[in-house]
Image: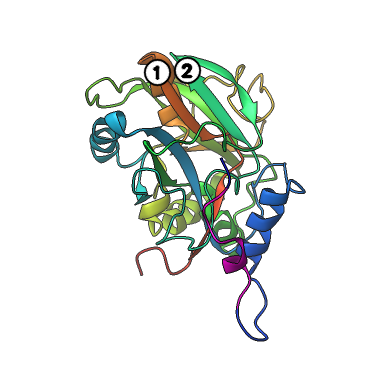
């Protein structure tokens, strides 16, 4: 199936040039950007993707509403329409991410570069806020969280909705103890991209699995002099797909988010 989105809409009229967000999406569409979006395209809201058949969309929307910390909804597309008309007009959710993960019957079948062959007129896409959106704000506040953001499974149950259930997935950043308060103060403003942390300190309290991370290198322990800070994560639906044995769910590959046109510092509370 060919894209129905007007490719030329990525190019602005007159002498205007494309924004960084539009350039990034174009590079992903052309296959020249296939790597992670962590710490990239600063200043723009990044989003997690979940694509489902229309028959499952309502239950998943309820799941998001009941677990808004992990699944803050930015946009839901019309069935069969891959264009996120509110958050990134002209984009195509079938091609404009660097990498996608495919889940069928509760099993991750692999990762692909585009989902053109999997998208149907019955497909509905959800864009969920990502904490990668506020990393630049943390850095401006003097929070040195390093280059690595981990995504980890936990033992915290989410609130079920229909077939969707499972445990919370979190992102973890390491910083000095003194930086925990400013990190909390800054991220609390970004309620549409996970907001404030859900835990600080010992990973064992929430059952965070450092040895088998979903994204990031394994850690035998938290390094000396560092404090672990945990935020709810938009990879949580992928865990729900596995546990609930969802027939089909297409998501972003962890760490490979969708770059919207929304500006992070405007998409938050004052």
Near mark 2 (Cα within 10 A), the count class, few <14, some 14-19 or many ≥20, is some
48 with respect to 69 (left or right)? right
- Secondary element at tag 1: loop
Residue 96 location, x and y as percent?
Answer: 60, 49
Q: Is residue 218 magenta?
A: no
Q: Nearer the viewer, residue 96 or 233?
A: 96
Which segment is the magenta one?
Answer: 3-12
Q: Is residue 256 visible?
A: yes
Q: Nearer the viewer, residue 217 or 202?
A: 217
* Residue under numbered circle 2: 104
Name the quadrant containing residue 239.
Answer: top left
Residue furthest front as drawn = 1
Which residue corresponds to the image point at 77% horizontal and 48% vertical from the top-left?
32
The answer to whether marks 1 and 2 mark residues whose Cβ atoms lie closer than 8 Å is yes
* Residue under numbered circle 1: 247
N-terminal-most mark, 1 or 2:
2
Judge whether 204 appears above or below 94 on screen: above
Most common SS among magenta residues: loop
Image quarter in which the N terminus is found = top right
- Secondary element at tag 2: strand
Which residue corresponds to the image point at 42% horizontal and 51% vertical from the top-left?
193
Residue furthest bottom as drawn = 15
Residue 256 location, x and y as percent?
Answer: 61, 41
Which residue corresponds to the image point at 49% horizontal and 48% vertical from the top-left?
47
Which residue corresponds to the image point at 39% horizontal and 43% vertical from the top-left?
80
Judge whether 196 appears above or below 218 on screen: below
Judge whether 188 appears above or below 220 on screen: below
Between the residue at mark 1 and the residue at mark 2, the CA separation in whole angstroms equals 5 Å
Near mark 1 (Cα within 10 A), the count class, few <14, some 14-19 or many ≥20, is some
């Amino acid at each position: 199936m060919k894209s129905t989105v007007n490719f030329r809409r990525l190019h602005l009229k007159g002498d205007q040039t494309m924004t960084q967000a539009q350039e990034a999406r174009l590079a992903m569409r052309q296959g020249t950007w296939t790597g992670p979006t962590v710490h990239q395209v600063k200043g723009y809201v990044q989003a997690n993707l979940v694509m489902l058949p229309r028959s499952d969309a309502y239950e998943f929307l309820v799941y998001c509403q009941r677990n808004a910390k992990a699944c803050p909804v930015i946009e839901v597309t019309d069935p069969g329409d891959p264009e996120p008309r509110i958050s990134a007009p002209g984009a195509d959710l079938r091609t404009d991410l660097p990498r996608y993960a495919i889940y069928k019957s509760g099993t991750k079948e692999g990762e692909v570069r585009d989902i053109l062959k999997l998208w149907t007129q019955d497909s509905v896409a959800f864009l969920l806020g990502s904490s990668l959106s506020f990393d630049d704000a943390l850095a401006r506040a003097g929070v040195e969280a390093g280059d690595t953001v981990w995504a980890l499974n936990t033992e915290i149950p989410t609130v079920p909705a229909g077939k969707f259930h499972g445990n919370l997935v979190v992102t973890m950043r390491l910083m000095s103890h003194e930086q925990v308060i400013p990190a909390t103060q800054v991220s609390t403003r970004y309620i549409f991209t996970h907001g404030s942390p859900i835990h600080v300190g010992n990973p064992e309290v929430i059952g965070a699995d450092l040895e088998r991370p979903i994204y990031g290198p394994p850690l035998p322990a938290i390094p000396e002099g560092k404090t672990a800070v945990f935020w709810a994560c938009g990879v949580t639906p992928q865990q729900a797909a596995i546990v609930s044995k969802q027939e089909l769910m297409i998501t972003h590959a962890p760490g490979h988010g969708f770059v919207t046109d929304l500006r992070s510092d405007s998409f938050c509370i004052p």
